[in-house]
Image (spheres, grey):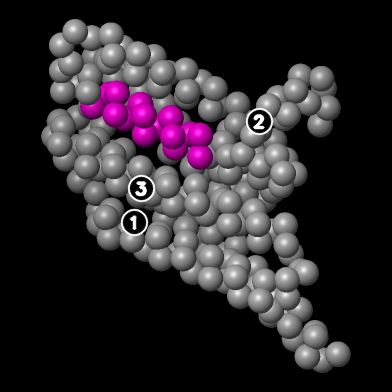
Amino acid sequence: MFAMLKRLIRGESLIRHSYAETYEMMELVADLYDQAVAYLLDQEEPSLDIHKEDKRVNHLEMQIRGDILRHFAVNPQVEVSSALVLSFVIGYVERVGDYAKNIEELAQMYSRPLREAPSAGALVEIAELAGVNIRRTREAFAREDRSLAIGIIKDHKRVRKVCNVALEAAFAAEDISREVLVCAMLARYLKRISAGLKNICTSIVAPYDQVGYTRQLELSNASGDS
């Protein structure tokens, strides 16, 4: 009995530890994104080594995966859904770190404040919204806040629309300037970041088999269901 109790406590503590590491991972990724975007929009040099810190994000992801595996080895019948959700979420968090690194590289290549570019106005707003939503996603996940999560999911529609307009404009241009090219690449990164945040938020509002999809959520909202 005592051995079983120890295994149960150990299994639960591994999941609790994994959640704590996930929050840490999300906070780090938010910082990396903010600094990368400030670099691109305003040429503010990052105080963090974004490439180095992105490796730390990767290490945290591997640690969490290891804890999940150890949890299942110790007590596979405890917190199964939580472990599955965590394994889903951390992949998207890690990708946001990758996109932050990509945005920093874009800032280095462009080497001027994108905020001043005439064609970047709508993308600047979306880039700033994404930074806010990374932290709001962390808050929603930590508090299991359905209302906040649904707001982020709905924001993705606007983000997707603005990003698609920027991409279509780039493809329609006969001569692609550096500014248009940078805007197109940023639009692609922002669209994928927002999609990742949306997917994380579905883990808060949907059962596991529907995580990553919003069709059923949208239908239930339209019909007035909670």
Q: CA distance from mark 2 to mark 1?
A: 29 Å
Q: Is residue 137 above or below residue 118?
A: below
Q: What x and y, as percent, mark residue 169? A: 31, 12
Residue behind mark 3: 98
Q: CA distance from mark 1 to mark 3?
A: 7 Å
Q: Is residue 161 above or below residue 113?
A: above
Residue at the image point whose x is 27% and y is 15% from the top: 170
Indicate the amino acid at tag 1. Answer: Asp
Determine the image quadrant of residue 182: top left
Q: State the SS at label 3.
A: helix
Q: Earlier in the sequence, mark 2 or mark 1?
A: 1
Q: CA distance from mark 3 to mark 2?
A: 24 Å
Q: For the view shown, which residue lies furthest in the bottom direction? A: 2
* Magenta residue span: 182-196
Mark 3 Cα-neighbour bin, 10 Å: few <14, some 14–19, many ≥20: many
Q: What x and y, as percent, mark residue 117? A: 22, 19
Q: What x and y, as percent, mark residue 184? A: 29, 23
Q: How many marks?
A: 3
Q: State the SS at label 2.
A: loop
Q: Main secondary structure of the magenta part?
A: helix
Residue behind mark 1: 54
Where, quadrant-wise, is the C terminus in this rendering?
top right
Q: For the view shown, which residue lies furthest in the right direction? A: 1
The answer to the question of whether label 1 and label 3 lie on touching residues, with beta carbons closer than 8 A, is: yes
| Magenta run includes residue 184 | yes
Q: Earlier in the sequence, mark 3 or mark 2?
A: 3
Residue behind mark 2: 214
Residue at the image point whose x is 28% and y is 24% from the top: 183
Q: What x and y, as percent, mark residue 155? A: 55, 27
Indicate the amino acid at tag 2. Answer: Thr
Q: Is residue 119 left or right of residue 204?
A: left
Mark 1 Cα-neighbour bin, 10 Å: few <14, some 14–19, many ≥20: many
